[in-house]
Image (spheres, rainbow, N blue to C red):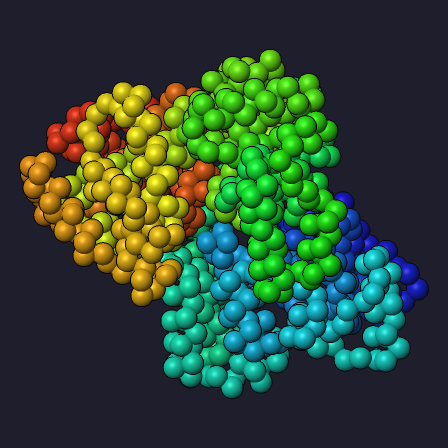
Amino acid sequence: MTNAVNTSLQGDIFLIEINNPPVNAASAAVREGVIDAIRQFAAEDKAKAAVLYGAGRTFVAGADIREFGKLPAGPMLPEVVQIVEDSEKPVVCIIHGTALGGGLELALGSHVRVALKGSKVGLPEVAIGVMPGASGTQRLPRLIGFEAAAEIIATGRQVSAKEALQLGIVDAIEDMDDPKAAGIAAARRVIDQNLPVRRLSKMDEKVQAHKGDTAFFDAIRADVKKKARGQIAPVRAIDALENAANMPFDEGMTAEREIFMELMNSDQSKALRHAFFAEREVAKVPELANGTPKEIKQAGVIGGGTMGSGITLSMLFAGIPVTMVERDEESAARGKANVLKVLDDGIKKGRYDEAYRDNLMNTLYKVTTDFEALGDCDIIIEAAFEMLEVKQDLFRTLDKVARKDAILASNTSYLDINKIASVTSRPENVLGLHFFSPAHIMKLLEVVVADKTSADAVATGFALAKKLKKIGVRAGVCDGFIGNRILEVYMKAAAFMVEEGTSPYAIDKAVVGFGYPMGPHQMGDLAGLDIGLMSRKRRIAEGYKGRYAFEYLDWLGEKGDLGQKTGRGCYDYSADPRKGAENPEFLAAIEQIRKEKGIPQKGELSSDEIMRRYMAAMINEGAKVVEEGIALRPLDVDIVMLSGYGSPRWRGGPMHYADTIGLDKVLADLNEFAKEDPVFWKPAKLIEDLVAKGENFSSLNG
């Protein structure tokens, strides 16, 4: 018997414990162990029912993703699930923690399913570009019907125990903490009541009701395709569900496995798996080997605007007490109102109740104009106006009022952390913590390491990211760090295309078609065009070099048309405050600027040509960021762009995308574009070197 699965007999109840920490993944050892256990159960005459449960904090949280893409080892999960279901004697599955993916499929093979309070179930395989491959598309609709099964599978969401009971996924919820004890109690009921063995593979009533109903599945498929936004796995999952209606169970299982393998070998699945593992690798930074994170018992935030209130909310939601400081009483009241508005919106959306809001506002949060109130804070995050002089003045003040061991952080988007740290007596305790708006929602946190930032300060930044449930990415100091530096370059590429005859709306349409949630001009309108204008003015004052093509956006900014917040920007929001429509005045201004500058016109580029340039610019700058050590690895660039800039996850991020299409092709594109502009399109040396060696970015990820 493998150590991953342990068995014992308690009276007439046979116990099967899965013990494969930390999350009891359904590895080859677990699969082999479960089959062994079921055979033992069958051979044990005293045993009248079996209890299948997980040791530790969860049942089976899914398949072992490390096995994906490798040669199959041991029995496959569909075989294991079928062997469990074929048991002549009842198998009771106890779900605690989570039963996800293969874990839920294993539970569906059991004859009785009992959930403990607080547990969750789900089939999240679409998150890694596949679909359930061990009967999820065949057994689940037989249990709860196609509509509910399609929604759960296509979204990959986790279902609470309460909802699972309502849907019929589980038969009961047990008010116990110990899965073993709950299993024994449930098995006892099954034995005493002589409950029949129920096999889902034999339950055809719900699926046969839609046999041959093409219109029914086409409607579900169309809805899923719209929401999937280019991802193929959710749509193919509906194909597998339709097979459940039209094929006998065994044939449906064969077809499910074929689709699963097709998806697993797809570029999308490889990209999503890259993203999955990269999110875990990105936290491996050199400073964590020696740095000791500071415990954050009290935080301070300077500024109550959009970013300051968002950072404050992130802290409050994580249970960290926050003191917010503003420059005057009016600003302090406005900052408090910003925090309260988001909390009130959460109540309206049913995320929590008034008592939760009141506890945060009255117990964990206070706002003041007195900087001395920051004296007890373990970390202070400045989110003030994006001007170096303003931030330096604040850090001089913080240096006087903050404890000597306090971590001082700036939320700057572009500015030099070294210059900010230089005005303090403790540069080793200064770092950048670049949150992304809205800060209480966005997952990315760039941890910016200055020349003198200590390992302890870096470790504290990463520990804070984890506590706030954000993805921390280490960045070096340069203008814009990782994300905004790359953003500036692909925005330049877009601006060049606009100057040369392509509509900004065509660019946005192409970028959205590629898989982004919005195009660069839509994004500018959402963020506020004044932010980019202010940054460009600063760069010009500092001696901006190279081709400048942002006059058309400067025209909007100087005019006061700053995007959604003013009702007009690149788009006109007078009729639709969120989506907007084309702005004819903006197009006329672009045409006039083209004439005044005498820019040779190429005409409107196709979507494919737009994306060739857009992605080449992004990839090339990403390579330079890695080459200069601003990002540790290509995967760090990918995670920044995925988590903070809307890069389609199913493409894996720009660096992985470059590997997918071929780094040699990217280099060829750069060399072609360099004939037009040898400065902007000059290929990164890293790309040239990798192509010369026949390697790609993945070789640098470790």
Q: Going by the image, does 154 lie left or right of 655?
A: right
Q: Pinpoint residue 291: horizontal percent, then vertical percent.
A: 65, 21
Q: Pinpoint residue 82: horizontal percent, then vertical percent.
A: 63, 66
Q: At 86% from the left edge and 80% from the top edge, which residue is drawn?
A: 193
Relative to 257, residue 662 above or below: above
Counting every numbered tag in the picture gives 0
Q: At 38% from the left edge and 52% from the top edge, which residue is drawn?
A: 565
Q: Nearer the viewer, residue 376 or 683?
A: 376
Q: Going by the image, does 516 lie left or right of 385?
A: left
Q: Going by the image, does 389 lie left or right of 50?
A: left
Query: Extreme right residue here?
Result: 11
Q: At 49% from the left edge and 79% from the top edge, which residue is drawn?
A: 245
Q: Nearer the viewer, residue 9 or 137?
A: 137
Q: Pinpoint residue 322: horizontal percent, then vertical percent.
A: 67, 39
Q: Nearer the viewer, residue 164 or 430?
A: 430
Q: Nearer the viewer, residue 456 or 213?
A: 456
Query: Extreme front residue here?
Result: 329
Relative to 196, residue 351 above or below: above
Residue 293 image-quadrant placement: top right
Q: Pinpoint residue 577: horizontal percent, then vertical percent.
A: 37, 61
Q: Is residue 70 among what the camera can see?
A: no
Q: At 61% from the left edge and 19% from the top edge, which residue is drawn?
A: 399
Q: Is residue 415 among what the camera can see?
A: yes
Relative to 268, residue 51 above or below: below
